[in-house]
Structure formats: structure tokens, C-alpha cells
Image (spheres, rainbow, N blue to C red):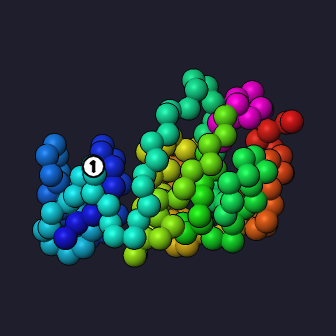
Amino acid sequence: MGFGLSEGIDMGYGWGRGQGKGRGRGRGGYGGYGGYGMGYGPGYGPGFQQPGMGQYTSIPPPPPGALRVAASVDENAGINSRISTRFARSMYMAIIDISAGKVVNVNIVPNPAANAMGGAGMMVAQWLVSCGVRVVIGSSYGPNAGGALAQAGITTHTVQPGTPVIEALRQLGLVKE
């Protein structure tokens, strides 16, 4: 059986292939319509969710010229949300757009992989890529999430858990406010 996450992205992680419902095929594991596992299997497309997974939140693309940053957080307190001790299984992801050294948009959204039965690192990495994230902030990264983010060209930064997101952005020099 294959598990596809979102339309149009095929990062090619894992073994096997899966045939997607409808519009296409994915190769090499996690992907838009790819399978996760050995051999052939159905790759479920849009609308399918792995048991235990949260709902994927559609995030509009970042404004032109803005840098999109994601941070793993365990609360929904806006820009003052604190960095989680976990990355792929944090309760929320803060999606922040930065332009000219200023925060222009903050979305705190439920992490769709927080309660996944397995493969949370790959799932959240693929979702962040589909959201247009270029930089990620967390307190630690598992090998699957870290590898997937690196392969996608996403820069990862490590900060102390409990640090407010705005403070982490200042420490990293991403905002000047």
C-alpha cells in the first residue's frame, strides 16, 4: 500500500513505487502519488489520509520576494509561540513570511504529521516543501526529517526549546525588529 501526500511533489524517498489514483504516478517512495513501501501498491492521492494523521492545511504562497520560514511549536500563541522539543511531531507549525527584515505574515497551523503512525519526518518535510518553506527552525531534527529537508534545499537552524519564535528569528538574524 502506498501513501501519497499531496499533488505534484515527488521527493523520491524510500523504496518502491505506487500507482496514484487519477492523474499521475510517483516513483521512489513518498511523493505526490508515490508509494511508500516495497514493490507496487496503490498510491493514494488527494483526499486520502493515513490513519492518525491530521488534516493538511493549505497555505497560500508567500508574497513575492518574501522568505518563508517554518518553526515547530507546541502552542498557538502567534509570533510568541515557543519552539517545541520535537520537530516532526510538534503540535503546530508556525509558517512565517519575512520581507525586508520584517515579519509580514504569521500562520500557526496544526502539524498534519503530529499523530502519524509512522514516517512523520518525511510527511512534514514534504508538506513544508509544498508550502514554499525555505528555512526551518526547530530544537532537534530526526534523521529522516533532517535528510529530507536537506535534500530539498531547505536550511535548518537549531535553537533551544522554549524560545519564542520572534526571539529565534532575531537570534538567527532573519528579522531586524
Q: x and y percent of residue 93 in the render?
A: 60, 54
Furthest-top residue in this view: 64
| Residue situated in front as seen by the camera: 163 or 47 | 47
Q: Is residue 168 visible?
A: no
Which residue is rendered at x = 49% and y = 34% of the image? 60
* Quarter assignment of residue 65: top right
Which image quarter holds the C terminus? top right
**Label 1 crowd (10 A; few <14 / some 14-19 / many >=20):** some
Q: Is residue 109 visible?
A: yes
Which residue is rendered at x = 51% and y = 67% of the image? 114
Furthest-right residue in this view: 177
> Circle 1 sits on which residue?
46
- In the image, residue 61 sits, relative to residue 33, either above or below, namely above
Residue 52 as seen in the image, left or right of residue 39: right
Q: x and y percent of residue 89 in the render?
A: 55, 69
Q: Main secondary structure of the magenta part?
A: strand
Residue 6 as seen in the image, left or right of residue 83: left
Residue 23 as seen in the image, left or right of residue 78: left
Q: Which residues are magenta?
A: 96-104
Badge 1 element? loop
| Residue situated in front as seen by the camera: 55 or 100 | 55
* Quarter assignment of residue 81: bottom right
Q: x and y percent of residue 134 in the render?
A: 57, 44
**Looking at numbered disc 1 in the image, what kind of residue is underneath it?**
Pro
Which residue is rendered at x = 69% and y = 71% of the image? 85
Residue 80 as seen in the image, left or right of residue 96: right
Which image quarter holds the N terminus? bottom left
* Quarter assignment of residue 174: top right
